[in-house]
Amino acid sequence: MKLAVPKETKPNENRVALTPEAVRGLVGKGFTVLVEQGAGLPAFFADESYLKAGAELVPAAASLYSAADVLLKVNAPTPAEIATMKSGAVLLSFLWASSNPAIVAACCRAGISVFAVDAIPRISRAQRMDVLSSQANLGGYKAVLLAANALGKLLPMMTTAAGTIRPAKVMVFGAGVAGLQAIATARRLGAVVEVTDIRPETKEQVESLGGKFIQVQADESVRVEGGYVKDVSEEFLKRQQELVARHVCEADIVITTALIPGRAAPRLVTEEMVRSMRFGSVIVDMAVEQGGNVAGSEMDRTVVKHGVTIIGVANLPSLLPLNASDLYARNLSTFLLHLAEPSGFKWELAEEITKGSLIIHQGRPVHPSVVQLAAT
């Protein structure tokens, strides 16, 4: 079975689906791996290292797409790229199917099967395949570094002959994987950290990292599935905003990480909150690609509103491409080996991980999110 790894074509994407180390492992198990020339360069992996790992280098993406039995990517291919894949091929990549109907339709027309890494069930058996966690972890780390670099003051307390410098205050919205790493990183840099999350079970994790938990009492409108908040009422968001507003105005840095899968990101930081912050404060909106948690944030731009710097980098893991690619490749290799052998895919359609991540099977939508989408 031929595995193919093309260059990523999405703007500002520096990651690659397989690293030379991952290629070596898959070749050792009997797979043939084709890699487009230059695919690993943005992540600091030279073509020669892929050759030494046992991959075959392919000069042109078009021939790679047409030859692939399995296409391995970070981001989903474009409809034009999908059209060049052979019928019966399999795609493994991020897909975000419910938000990308054009991609789903192109995959159906091409007669391919698609496993979405963003749909892998977040269960204990699938932890080593969890690309969302591995990439969010890096994103939370980088968000704090970007904020610290943009802030015109120190994060730690410092005692000098001229007097004592007080530590910076960091406010983190969301204590998921990204938020917890942001807390840990800010604390390592010496900041005082406050955290809000509507899931009370995160309080212990926040406090174990040295953060102060600001609790908003949940109500029946809050629905949590698979570790994510699936739904929340406008009334609850209003109460949350009222509680955290006074903490935001005292913060030097605000990091927002809140996402609702399949929906626009909730607006957590209003323009009034931004206006209340001290001149020179910094906000990093990690949800900017899904519409943003912060009023005034703009995707892939850094803007200044009311004297506050708002950073809206959509793809933070791509700013750490070597580590991000390494973790993604390990996740992806584990996922592939769960689904397939060198002779072909197992197609255990009732198995939990397969069932949860299989979006399209031989050109037919099978996942509830796209079956419903096709019906509307």
Image (cartoon, rainbow, N blue to C red):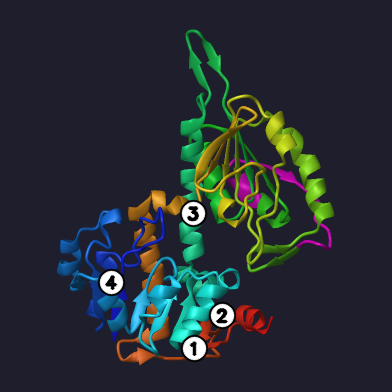
Disc 2 marks which amino acid?
Gly
Looking at marks 1 and 2 on the same chain, the residue that comes earlier in the sequence is marked by 2
Q: Are marks 3 and 1 in contact (CB under 8 Å)?
A: no
Residue 354: mark: none
Q: Quadrant of residue 80?
A: bottom left
Residue at left offset 59%, top offset 52%: 287
Q: CA distance from mark 3 to mark 1?
A: 34 Å
In the image, the segment drawn in magenta is: 204-222
Nearer the observer, disc 3 or disc 4? 4
Q: Position of residue 289 (x, y in %)?
A: 56, 54
Vertical order, 279 against 367 (above or below) = above
Q: Earlier in the sequence, mark 2 or mark 4?
A: 4
Name the mark on residue 137: 3
How far is disc 2 from disc 4 in space, using C-alphas?
Answer: 30 Å
Q: Nearer the viewer, residue 170 or 203?
A: 170
The mark lying in front, picked from 3 and 1, is: 1
Q: In the structure shown, which secondary structural element does the residue marked by tag 4 occupy?
A: helix
Marks 4 and 1 close (CB-CB < 8 Å): no
How far apart are the two marked residues, 1 and 2, measured between alpha carbons?
17 Å
Q: Which circle marks residue 356 in the picture?
A: 2
- Residue at the spot of label 1: 363
Q: Secondary structure at mark 1?
A: loop
Mark 1 or 2, which is nearer the eye? Answer: 1
In this rendering, position of residue 143 left or right of residue 15: right
Compare marks 2 and 3 and give the one earlier in the sequence: 3
**Quick one: which residue is furthest to the top in this view?**
162
Q: Position of residue 163 (x, y in %)?
A: 53, 10
Q: Gap in Å between the C-alphas at discs 2 and 3?
A: 23 Å
Identify the residue under disc 4: 61
